[in-house]
Amino acid sequence: MSDWLPFIVSGVASGSIFALAALGLVLTQKTSGVFNFAHGAVAATGAYAFFELWQLRGLPWPLAAVVAIVVVGPLLGLVLEWVTRTLGDARVVMRIVATVGILLALQGGLTWAYGALTRRFPPFLPTGTFGLGGTRVGWDQLVAVLVALAGAIGLSLFLSRTRTGVAMRAVVDDAPLLDLMGTDPTRIRRMSWMIGAAFAAASGVLIGPFLGLDATLLTLLVVQAFGAAAIGRFASLPLTYVGGLAVGILSACVTKVAADVPGIAGLPPGIPFIVLFAVLVLLPKRLPTDRRRRRPTILAAVSAPPRPGRAAVIVVAVAAVVVPHVVGARLPVYMAGAALALIFLSLGLLVWTAGQVSLCHAAFAAVGAAAFYHLTGSGVPWFLALLLTGLVTVPLGALVAVPAIRLAGIYLALATFGFGILFQQVFYSTDMMFTTINQRVIPRPAGFSSDMAYYYVLLGVLAAAMVFVAVVLRSRLGRLLRALADSPLALTTQGTTVSVSLTLVFCISAFLAGIGGALLGGVTEAINGSGFGPFNSLLWVAVIVLAGVRLFRGAVVAALAVAVVPSYSSISPELQTTLFGMLAVAAALLADGAVDVGRPFRRWASASEGRATSPVAARTAGRLGPMATEAGR
Amino acid sequence: MTGGLSVDGLTVRFGGAVAVDGFSFTAPPGRITGLIGPNGAGKTTTFNACTGIIRPAAGTVGLDGVDVTRVSVAARARRGLGRTFQEVELFDSLTVAANVAMGREGSLAGANPLRHVVGHSGDRRAVDAVTAEALEMCGIAELAPARAGSLSTGHRRLVELARVLAGRFHLLLLDEPSAGLDEHESEAFAGILRRAVAERGVGIFLVEHDMALVMAVCEHIHVLDFGRHLFSGTPDEVAASAAVRDAYLGAEVGDVA
């Protein structure tokens, strides 16, 4: 028992911090109905603000902590409240992408401003220890426990005893009624977002010294609070608090076990996500549902099957074929673009056609890359290995379809997000995937090893995949998926077992994403797990939403935006992430997914339709032409 | 158990509240059966329990002599139980024709992964034929290319009805199909229902607030009040019943009939 005590103590301390973050998350989720994916990024921002004020500006730490928690956090809370209020009754995809966009913007911005290297975060609390029941407890650990406890008790007193607190509970039940009774629901929601964000910032400040200053780690660590919130079923504050402690203690104990069992070394950091995934999948029934009615008018283009004109296809195809001859040394970014277009195609099929959100798509691609390495390494011919790679990824798609069957909307997104992180933490560094050295050599097909030849291979596979998807969309499955996106209930009552449709689309999507990952590996001929992290999954979803609802065009536009366009600008990757994040928020806010980056082009093109130029030709020339000529110079 | 729908001792609870309390009834094939009752009587809850959308606390649901109480929504639909919704559930981004076609294609896909992807060789033609027939029957053939999300409530109700008529259903549960329709549209609606029963021998089980429509088309009516069975009988008997009159408190059941 005494062996375990130190682990339990540290588990209670870290669990308290998770609990604190989770309480803030549940509060905002309850009062606004929007799940805040950016909660971890708010915590990270709080920690950075604290670091900036205390270490770089020389403020005394208590003052810096107060500013970070009481000013910076709530300010972000106000932004989040505005975003979620403006979202209104937007579709689930948009509500997910809005807060995911904020996460990307904050995380990218912090990394850009402070650098990607982890900075040491000196302890600000006393680091001494005292004896307690045969083990040593750090004062900093005690403070974390006390702060979380005070937060939990304070919050529950606030909700039960104060007028504003009672109104906060009322706004959950019936916001219009509260409005009629003379209390402005917006003011109440604003308050709850400020409190929720302050809780997040406090957890960031507390966890900083344990972790170091690293925007990605801080963001992900507070994502562990999602597990705690799931235990509280996203509604119960006491259960959420208990859930935080449970997650902390469980992680610490598994860390102890893993120290003796070499095979599960990757497991401990994955525990909170196992909890999240398990709770969501096993106990989904009483999750708070979305009581808002869907917006009745769905925009015309949504989930329409792609009908590209022949001229468009020809022009894009010609441009794609000509690219290697005009872009010179930039060819590798176009190669990456071709591989990514395949991944975006697979993601678009899920998001736009079937109305499902996957926040673990990078895991599909990673599995594809790793499987391809093993297959080609054991002598399977290149093209056969590529096909088999897709098939190897299919079971993973089927696995992710399990939460899709049991959950919908935001909870599905959350489950896939947890799954993606879990997968990365547990498997990426094993011998099955990228090993601890984190490098795998991915071959190109024999006879196509030059960049130009490999580019045409990529193009050929992409074209084949597009034909395959077009066939799927025109088949019965395509019709079923579009029906499913509109109303799963109506489709079920027609006699379709929708879990079959869902499993099929996830399998097809994983198949294509796996192949995309393998091809992406061939671009650099060596690949590691860093290009397939959970943040890549988030970024990809944000970009696919930005790129608009037309499946094929969206995939190409998204790939160009992520892989090609940045190489023509001097913007750093971190700032690009921020930019994509902000654009995704804007896209979600502007028109409930009706944002279609091609629209201005189309309007301009249709105005000039009288002329001989085909509208699509003009549009494509407008998009590709300047880049191509600039590169040719 | 007989043909059609036969429900025995149906009880549905929401937390502590009993929405439906020991309700037993039948809705046989080849005729129109009505289910009426004041707001909150448990009519839609009864429908949801019959189609499997909610699980009853007690009681059994029989379909054509088979106990389907534990059978999934989709499997009940494949056994011939079709329904419409009080708040119309259409595939809003699809065309009217695609919506109606899905009534047949949805059950053809069923639970079979292969049939999700490819149909049998004659499927396409069969689906087109039943779609055209259902659209014609509901008088909305000219709406076929319109997007369902852009329609008025009245048209949406007709599309939903056409979809359920295009399906391989022999028992239709219609939840307030005439809500939002004007008097003229309601009459046309009654005509469609009668024709469906006469030409296809389907059974229809109807929740309806429009008393004129109920009295005009139903052969038999069940009355539900506060989740309990209040009365069953022909329209004339229901109109004459003092108990029903009391439950409706001046809804003038008899006058309308």
Image: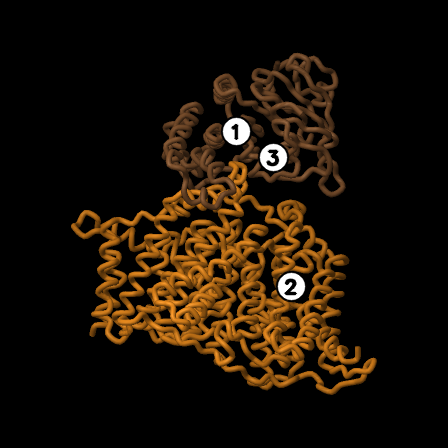
Chain colours: A orange, B brown
Viewer-proximal residue among A121 and B4: B4
Give neighbour class at mark 2: few <14, some 14-19, many 20+ (Cα, 10 Å). many
Residue A417 position within the rendered picture, expressed as x and y whole percent measured from the top left:
54, 62
**What amino acid type should be assigned to the residue bearing mark 2?**
Val
At a point 68% along the width and 73% down the height, the residue shown is A254
Q: What separation in Å lies between label 1 and label 3 (alpha carbons)?
A: 12 Å
Residue A20 position within the rendered picture, expressed as x and y whole percent measured from the top left:
68, 68
Position above or below: A354 against A521: above
At a point 41% along the width and 57% down the height, the residue shown is A346
Outermost residue to the left: A612
- Residue that mark 2 sits on: A275
Tell whether A160 sits left or right of B99.
right
Viewer-proximal residue among A500 and B164: A500
Q: Are marks 1 and 3 on the same chain?
A: yes
**What amino acid type should be assigned to the residue bearing mark 3?**
Thr
Residue B51 numbered mark, or none:
3
Which type of secondary structure does the marked residue at label 3 adopt?
A: helix
Residue A299 position within the rendered picture, expressed as x and y whole percent measured from the top left:
42, 45
